[in-house]
Amino acid sequence: MPFSDSIDFLIIGAGFAGLVAGQRLASAGWKCVVADRRSHFGGNAHDAIDAAGVLVHRYGPHYFRSNSQRIVDHLSTFTDWHSVEYRIKSFTEGRYWSFPVNLATFEELIGRPSTTPEFENWLATKRISFPEPKNSEEVILSQVGRELYEKFFEGYTVKQWKRHPRDLDPSVCGRIPIRTQRDDRYLREEFQALPKDGYSRMFERMIDASPRLELHLGTDFKEALHRWPHKHLIYTGAIDEYYDYRFGELPYRSLRFEPESFGAEALVVREPISGKAGFWQPAMQVNYPDAAVPFTRIVEIKHATGQHVAATTIVREYPADWKRGDEPYYPIPAPDAAAAYAKYATLAAKEDRVSFIGRLATYRYYNMDQVTGMALTEADKLLRRYGKPS
Ligand code: FAD
Ligand code: UDP
């Protein structure tokens, strides 16, 4: 039964931010409506079975990882986990490389077996000293020097962001680990796993567990605002859009996803390349740093999900300029963008009955676990403020 009278919390966006906060508030007895303009929930973490029968991440690969036991415990209420050690490759100069940079990458570079001390000595002669790296170029040069920076980072970053690494915060390229041992996992965090039955199933359980939460898809913010009088608004969309672009548009980077599926027969032919029956490429993700290649990466998520299915699907990811109406996939972590956002943040700080959470509303290049943490913290703050429903 749809709620008829006024509600307690109106939540815009059914991604991690909106659903985690909504579930928490609804479980405390507050009446919540979550509205999303898309036709599905889950935001950019949405996954679904495609026409070939393969479970795919519709908006690019979403590798769950976290160092926070509190966040993992919270999500574990709604899902079991499929443990994955995320491993990828880089493809440049006509061959696959072990990536992120580790001892195997060095061995591939010099064409013979090596050791950690030898690699460390080599790096010591290559590193360029920046005691406090100020941008993404300095953060990589200070760890591996120019040769590996140019091979793996410079071209990829310019392609992805349409900005030079020196015009991006250190945290962008600094996300990628550099190791002198053989550990070739793409991510650093302690907990690395995917929701066992996928993200959509996890969100479905979150919604099902919340009778006081009502979800309305295909519903835009303006329509929802008009339709549901409320006590408090939680907004997880883009902050510049919320304020009708009063100070102009914030910069974003967009993407175009190009999926391609292959049946079992086509894969037999690819087998020597993929190295594994039933797969198209040798890893769940292959990065393409070369400027001449128009996409940044090819993702074959079946490697990570562990789904048993004969077909496979790969997705090529093409970076794209953002204009109003496109999906603003990435806020841009750079000083000029932060200054532009600060004007909107000042307005947001003055709001009494509106909370801004999530990647777009706080203009932060945040991972899913960080957004989950932010949503839980905000929900707890609101529970303290409003107490118990009467
Ligand atoms: P979103 O998922 O963007 O959800 C916001 C929702 O609000 C959307 O569904 C949108 O339709 C809706 N909305 C916006 N405006 C309005 C409006 N005006 N009216 C109605 N609805 C509106 N994180 C990781 O941890 N690991 C990864 O490997 C990873 N990979 C990523 C790869 C890509 C290509 C991208 C783009 C992101 C990746 N992320 C990853 C980040 C992850 O997607 C985010 O941390 C997370 O999805 C943020 O959740 P959110 O709820 O803040 O935002
Ligand atoms: N990066 C790079 N080369 C790579 C992989 C990443 O230069 O092979 C840089 C690039 O700037 C990228 C950033 O590191 O945007 C973060 O990479 P990640 O794979 O974490 O990006 P995301 O999955 O968030 O798009």
Image (cartoon, helix red, strand yellow):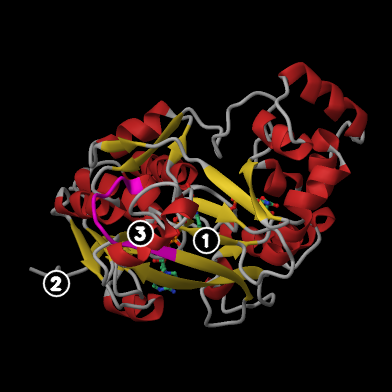
Residue extending farthest to the left is 1
Residue position for label 2: 4
Tell me whether circle 3 and circle 2 mark residues in contact (CB < 8 Å).
no
Say if mark 2 contacts mark 1, CB within 8 Å: no
Residue 228 lies in quadrant: bottom left
Q: Residues within 10 Å of mark 3 (few under 14, many from 20)?
A: some
Q: CA distance from mark 3 to mark 2?
A: 57 Å
Q: Amino acid at mark 3?
A: Val
Q: Is residue 379 left or right of residue 110?
A: left
Residue on which the image places disc 1: 298
Q: Can I make out residue 57 in this image? A: no
Give me the disc on residue 268: 3
Q: Give the magenta range.
A: 305-314
Question: Helix or strand or loop: what does disc 2 sit on?
Answer: loop
The x and y percentages for residue 40 are 29, 69
Residue 209 coordinates in the image, percent (x, y): 15, 48
Residue 164: where, in percent of width, then height? 81, 60
Viewer-proximal residue among 25 and 129: 129
> Which callout, 2 or 1, points to the residue nearer the camera?
1
Q: Residue at x 48, y 58 (%)?
A: 299
Which residue shows up at 39% across the image and 41% down it? 376
- Nearest to the eye among marks 3 and 2: give it: 3
